[in-house]
C-alpha cells in the first residue's frame, strides 16, 4: 500500500467545540490524513460552520450525527448533509429498512458519482453489551445483531457501516468486499489505550479489512500530532502488502 493510500484511510476525530480548534487542527494535519470527523458535540456547538471550516482548508468530512428518526425526517436530514458536501454521513441501522431505504433514495435522487456522500450505518454501539440489549427487549448476542443489522443496511442500499475492530471480519464475510467498514477503537503500537477496551493497531485493522480508521487521542494528545499521524501512516503501509 502506498503512503497516500494509507494516509487517506485515516479519519481524525475532531473532538473539539470551537471553530478556532478546527483551524488549528486542519493546519497541523494538512496533507497528513484523509478526513476529519465532525460529531455531535462539535456540530451542536458550531453547526454547519464546522463542516465549512474544514472544507475551507481543503479537508474532507465525515459527518457523524447518527440519525435515528421517522423515515421522512432522516431522509431530509441526510439530504441536507449531502448538500453540505460531506464525504461520509451516518444513521442508526436500528431505525429499520424503510428508514435506510428512504434516506438512500433521497440522496441518490440528487447526487451521483464522486459528489454523492457514502452513507454508513451504525449497527450496535460498542458501548452496548448483552445486558443493554436485553433491557430493551433484544434477546440476541451483540455479534448476531451486528451482523444482522449490517446485512440489513447493505440490503437497504447503504454503502457501509461503522464497526469495532473485532467485528470487521464478520461483517466482511457477511457483506462482501465492496461494503465500506469504518473502524474506531484503533490504537497505534506507540500510543496509550485511553478508555478504548477492545483495540487493534492501525495495521491490524486495515489487514482485517477496514477501509477507514477513526483516530482521535493518539494524534490529538501526542506531543507532535503531525509526527504521530505520519507514524500511523507508516504503520499501515508496513503491515499491509
Ligand atoms: O480518541 P479516540 O481515538 O478514542 O477517538 C475515537 C473517536 O471515535 C471518538 O470520536 C469516539 O467518539 C468515536 N467512537 C469510538 N468508539 C465507537 C464509536 C465511535 O471511539 N465505538
Image: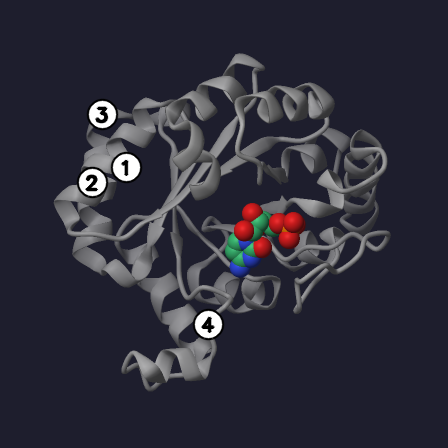
SS class, disc 2: helix
Q: Give the residue pinned by disc 2.
A: 75
Q: Nearer the viewer, residue 137 or 10?
A: 137
Could you tell me how many numbered marks the image carries?
4
Tell whether circle 3 marks a residue whose Cβ is less than 8 angstroms from ligand 1: no
Categorize mark 1 by other alpha carbons within 10 Å: few (<14), some (14-19), many (20+): many
Can I make out residue 183 in this image?
no
Q: Taking 143 as reference, is 49 above or below it? A: above
Instruction: Identify the mark nearer the N-term, 4 or 3.
Output: 3
Can I make out residue 227 in this image?
yes
Q: CA distance from mark 4 to mark 3?
A: 35 Å
Q: Give the residue pinned by disc 3.
A: 110
Please state if 43 lies on the left or on the right of 70 as rendered.
right
Residue drawn at x 53%, y 26% as measured from the top left: 60
Judged by depth in the image, the label closer to the viewer, 4 or 3, is 4
Q: Give the residue pinned by disc 4.
A: 128
Residue 132: x and y, percent?
A: 40, 78
Categorize mark 3 by other alpha carbons within 10 Å: few (<14), some (14-19), many (20+): few
Q: CA distance from mark 2 to mark 4?
A: 26 Å
Q: Give the residue pinned by disc 1.
A: 78
Q: Taking 145 as reference, is 215 above or below it? A: above
Amino acid at each position: 500500500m502506498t503512503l497516500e493510500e494509507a494516509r487517506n484511510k485515516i479519519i481524525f476525530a475532531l473532538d473539539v467545540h470551537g471553530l478556532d480548534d478546527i483551524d488549528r487542527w486542519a493546519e497541523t494535519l494538512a496533507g497528513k490524513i484523509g478526513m476529519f470527523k465532525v460529531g455531535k458535540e462539535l456540530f451542536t456547538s458550531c453547526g454547519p460552520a464546522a463542516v465549512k471550516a474544514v472544507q475551507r482548508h481543503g479537508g474532507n468530512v465525515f459527518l457523524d450525527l447518527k440519525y435515528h428518526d421517522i423515515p421522512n425526517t432522516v431522509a431530509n436530514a441526510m439530504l441536507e448533509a449531502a448538500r453540505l458536501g460531506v464525504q461520509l454521513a451516518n444513521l442508526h441501522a436500528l431505525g429499520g429498512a424503510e428508514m435506510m431505504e428512504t434516506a438512500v433514495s433521497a440522496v441518490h435522487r440528487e447526487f451521483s458519482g464522486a459528489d454523492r456522500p457514502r452513507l454508513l450505518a451504525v449497527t450496535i454501539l460498542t458501548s452496548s453489551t448483552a445486558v443493554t440489549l436485553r433491557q430493551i427487549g433484544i434477546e440476541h448476542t451483540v455479534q448476531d445483531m451486528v451482523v444482522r443489522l449490517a446485512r440489513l443496511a447493505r440490503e437497504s442500499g447503504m454503502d457501509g457501516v461503522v464497526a469495532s475492530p473485532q467485528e470487521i471480519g464478520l461483517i466482511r464475510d457477511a457483506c462482501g468486499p465492496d461494503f465500506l467498514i469504518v473502524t474506531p477503537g484503533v490504537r497505534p503500537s506507540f500510543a496509550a489505550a485511553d478508555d478504548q477496551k477492545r483495540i487493534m493497531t492501525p495495521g491490524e485493522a486495515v489487514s482485517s479489512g477496514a477501509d477507514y480508521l477513526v483516530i482521535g487521542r493518539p494524534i490529538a494528545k501526542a506531543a507532535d500530532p503531525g509526527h504521530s499521524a505520519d507514524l500511523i501512516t507508516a504503520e499501515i503501509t508496513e503491515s499491509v502488502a
